[in-house]
Image (cartoon, grey):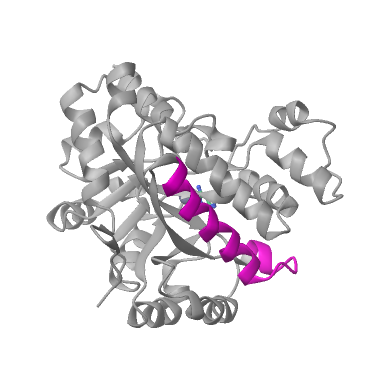
Amino acid sequence: MDAFIAKLPKAELHIHIEGSLEPELMYALAARNNIRLPYASAGELRKAYAFSSLQDFLDIYYQGMSVLITEQDFYDLALAYLGRAAADNVRYAEIFFDPQGHTARGVAFETVINGLLRALADGERLFGIRAHLIMCLLRHLDEDDAERTLDLALPYKDRILGLGLDSSEVGHPPSKFKNVFARAGREGFRLVAHAGEEGPPEYVWEALDVLGVERVDHGNRALEDKELVRRLAADRMPLTVCPLSNLALCRVEALHQHPLRRMLDLGLNVTLNSDDPAYFGGYLNSNYQAVADALGLGRDEIGQIARNGFAASFRSKDGMTKRG
Ligand code: ADE
Ligand code: ZN
């Protein structure tokens, strides 16, 4: 099965570029930028990666991304991810980035976007992998901050595929961002949001009905609501499921209990993704292999999930497809 998965052409639709920052690169960038990190070495830092909740992880994730200062740092980060993804036979990726995690530290939006876009162009040339960017809003911040971030993105709107919503979920429902999502939709951004990772099914309803998302990131807790499951199945709404993330953040105790099996049985449109691979112990093939082993998935199911990834993407033959 491992060889089958390795050979399978795959799309990745849920990857936070800042979550692909491996400790070794983090330490190299810290040295380059004269930043002191609180752990003695990359190995010591890795040992601190033991999380019991999303917030536990996010605290370390925001601290880690503070080594990203220059355009070259963002370039190096994204090119490293693209190389790893290409080695997993990922042919196409839609990549999240968190501009507010950088602008709040005084790094200009232009610095972030120029580094990432240059890496995407080189990644296609060097590794043959196509990729686009989805800008995520941090939901623990307020909607005014989100609106200002969308303003910063508008000059680049032809080069940013979509808008997403991430960070601390509980207490920050999608409806908090109703206006900014409506404006982004009018500006042509494709819309997605994290919902039902830790938050209740109501947040998934809101992502669909208040924000008008075209994909739900995670969506695990939707299974607690039968009517919601019916809706997701009827709409063929894609869910970007991230098994190793769910395990690392204690959303499941063990992978054999992962809801993916039930999602498939319920006819949901699931895709597999790595979320924050540098923190959760594996890139895309590791996620496929982990669920194939733990849930006893066969080649037909694995192949179907990989096809779902391409079908749920916003790609088109000649570039990215914005909303018309
Ligand atoms: N930001 C990076 N990874 C995230 C996740 N799994 N959930 C919410 N926000 C995130
Ligand atoms: Zn995520």
Residue 84's spot in the image, x, y percent?
49, 35
Using residue 222 as the reference point, say whether residue 100 is left or right of it: right
In this rendered view, identify the residue nearer to me: 258 or 183.
183
In this rendered view, identify the residue nearer to me: 242 or 157.
157
Residue 201's spot in the image, x, y percent?
34, 56
Q: Is residue 199 magenta?
A: no
Using residue 45 as the reference point, say whether residue 221 is left or right of it: left
Residue 237's spot in the image, x, y percent?
22, 55
In this rendered view, identify the residue nearer to me: 217 or 188.
188
Using residue 160 as the reference point, say whether residue 216 is left or right of it: left
Q: Quadrant of residue 309?
A: top left
* Residue at (29, 42) in percent of width and height: 271
In this rendered view, identify the residue nearer to me: 243 or 154.
154
Say if residue 244 shows up in the picture: yes
> Residue furthest toward the front?
125
* Residue at (69, 45) in percent of width and height: 60
Say if residue 251 shows up in the picture: no
* Residue at (40, 83) in percent of width and height: 183
- Of the 4 image quadrants, the one containing the N terminus is top left
Using residue 183 as the reference point, say whether residue 1 is left or right of it: left
Residue 265's spot in the image, x, y percent?
17, 35
- Of the 4 image quadrants, the one containing the C terminus is bottom left
Magenta stretch: helix, strand or loop mostly: helix
Is 89 rendered above or below residue 56? Answer: above
Q: Is residue 109 magenta?
A: yes
User: Magenta region: which residues?
Assistant: 101-126
